[in-house]
Image (cartoon, rainbow, N blue to C red):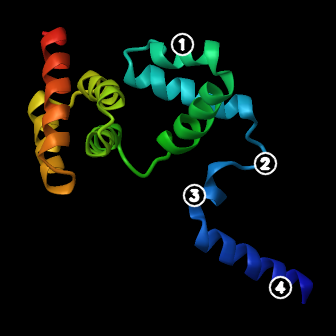
Amino acid sequence: MKTRHRIIAAALLVAAFPAAALSQTPSQTTAERQQRGAEVIRSLNKGETQPNLERMREEFPFLAEATEGYALGDIWSRPGLDSRTRQLAAVTAFAALGETGIMRVHAGYALNIGVTEEELKEAIYLVTVTSGFPRAIAASQALAELFAERR
């Protein structure tokens, strides 16, 4: 009976927290997770590292490692969304939160992988509905600067 209860408890845990169950298996070391995160960055950033992450690594190494291992290695590398969809979602979410600096980084990645300026503009138009005109306007200004720099 104890084995059966453990199996049921494990099934309930997976049902309640599926991302936790899938994010790290015992064979995944921190180094492997960080390697996957580094690969994600290079795939989005034309084969280069991310300068903001590298600066963070100097002053806040734990935060950089957590970002690379968890956010990028565990979450960003999941197979459920393609890179274009993931970047459009990130741009929209960061714009809605008013985080235009991080939004701009992800908009750059989006452009690197083939998302068009028009698609990014459409994503920002959605922000007017969810978070209001002030955040959409701030996001549009950050995008306009990014577009001008890349032309």
How many numbered discs, if any?
4
Distance between the Cα atoms at labels 3 and 1?
Answer: 29 Å
- Which label lies toward us, 3 or 4? 3
* Amino acid type, residue under disc 1 in the picture: Arg
Q: Residues within 10 Å of mark 4 (few under 14, many from 20)?
A: few
Q: Quadrant of the N terminus?
A: bottom right
**Which residue, given by chain and number where applicable, does mark 1 sit on?**
55
Q: Which mark is residue 4?
A: 4
- Going from the N terminus, do you reach mark 2 or mark 4 first? 4
Distance between the Cα atoms at labels 1 and 2?
Answer: 30 Å
Distance between the Cα atoms at labels 4 and 1?
Answer: 49 Å
Q: Secondary structure at mark 3?
A: helix
- Which label lies toward us, 3 or 1? 1
Q: Secondary structure at mark 4?
A: helix
Q: Quadrant of residue 27?
A: top right
Q: Quadrant of residue 36?
A: top right
Q: Which mark is residue 19?
A: 3
- Going from the N terminus, do you reach mark 3 or mark 1 first? 3
The residue shown at (45%, 12%) is 48
- 126 up-or-down from 105: above or below: below
- Which label lies toward us, 1 or 2? 1
The picture places residue 138, in percent across and down from the top left corner, at 18, 33
**Which residue, given by chain and number where applicable, does mark 2 sit on?**
26
Q: Quadrant of the C terminus?
A: top left
- 75 up-or-down from 109: above or below: below
